[in-house]
Image (spheres, grey):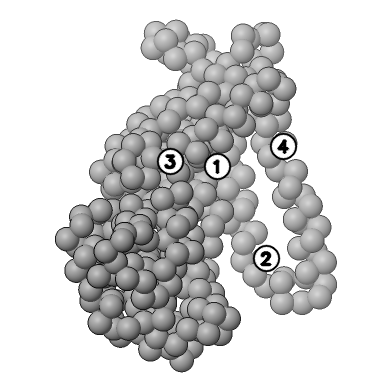
Amino acid sequence: MPGDLRDPDDVQVPDEDQASEDVQASGERDAPAVGRARLIAGAVMTAVRAVRHWVGRSARTGRGRVLLAAVTAVALAIPSVIGFLLVSAADDGGGAPERVASIGVMAPLSGASADAGSSVRNAVTLAVEEANRDRTVPGWKLEVVAHDDLSRPDGGAAGADLFADDKRMIGVVGPLSSSVAMVSLDRLGEAGLPVISPSNAEPTLTERPEAPDDRPYPTYFRLSGTDEQLSAVAADYAVHTLGRSRISVVDGSPDYGMITLAERFARDAREAGATVPAVHRVEGGSTDDDEIERTARAIRDEAPDLVYLATGAAFAGSCGRPSPTRVCRCRCWAPTGCSATTTSSARSRSLMVM
């Protein structure tokens, strides 16, 4: 069962005296206040789910769109309201000392994707430092707790346990990888933690194939589009804007029994009128010269006018690396998911094959 917010009516909240004794005994002085804040966040999320179906209906009429505009204006003020409620939940009326709340960052901080993960951690850290400096939430100090998920499911599971068990944790930024999200969102949702990913693209994270209007993880949000959207736009651009008619596809995505970005692109490119001879499966995070060479030779035999690389940054960058022993055959193009600095050349340079 996908993660969901805990029902506030099912949560046993100790009285003030007992809560104070428990906190002093455990040394976690901030835990009761953060717990109340989580309950408030749960109430907000319950209201969001109730409004969601109304939004879908209202968007179909002119009057409804006007109402939606007004609702949007109100929604933009929600962060300020939540900040006020957070302070109110923690205020015991006794001039309590500054409390601490944690914001988790789940991202790859080592390995091939460390640059992307470190950038996200640094951005969150900067935002928290500015919020603390400006006293955005009076009476509270925010801190960043970063976890290296290694861009692997086991790393994500460990991070989810770490954050869910942290009584100071109020929300999580990340993960970057959809495969990590698949194993961590249940645990984070059960803990009532809001999760915002800057880059997850797997469509089923925000909708069920059998019920598109049903969100599997009510506390989860993302800032990027889905693979379904990306593949459709990319295929249309490749065929109708770039004018490519024969496209080879390299797929380095993890295989979890679901259609991958590369497979979606191949499907959409064929529907747009292009020929896609094959989808080549590779280890996307690998820089193994033998695998790269085998893939390059197979692509050369297909004689494409474009190669679509849906792989990790390391593999894509190696494919675009110039070599005096290789001959330029066709342009190589990678989706935004591979846009680390190591692939900037691969997106604009021709694929080099023997």
How far apart, in angstroms, are the residues tagged by discs 4 and 2? 21 Å
Q: Residues within 10 Å of mark 2 (few under 14, many from 20)?
A: some
Instruction: Confirm whether residue 1 shows in the render.
Output: no
Q: Does dot 4 land on a helix, a strand or a loop?
A: helix
Question: Residue type at mark 4?
Answer: Val
At x 63%, y 9%, the residue is 96
Question: Residue type at mark 2?
Answer: Val
At x 49%, y 60%, the residue is 336
> In the rendered view, does 256 fall on the left or right side of 186?
left
* Quadrant of residue 282 within the rendered picture: bottom left
Q: Look at the image and tell me in which quarter the C terminus lies.
A: bottom left
| Residue 210 locus on image (x, y percent) | 41, 74
Q: Residues within 10 Å of mark 1 (few under 14, many from 20)?
A: many
Instruction: Confirm whether residue 28 shows in the render.
Output: yes
Q: Does dot 3 land on a helix, a strand or a loop?
A: helix
| Residue 51 locus on image (x, y percent) | 65, 59
* Quadrant of residue 98 within the rendered picture: top right
At x 23%, y 76%, the residue is 298
Circle nearer the N terminus (1, 3): 1
* Residue, disc 2: 55
Q: Does dot 2 land on a helix, a strand or a loop?
A: helix
Residue 42 bears which disc, if any?
Answer: 1
Circle nearer the N terminus (3, 2): 2
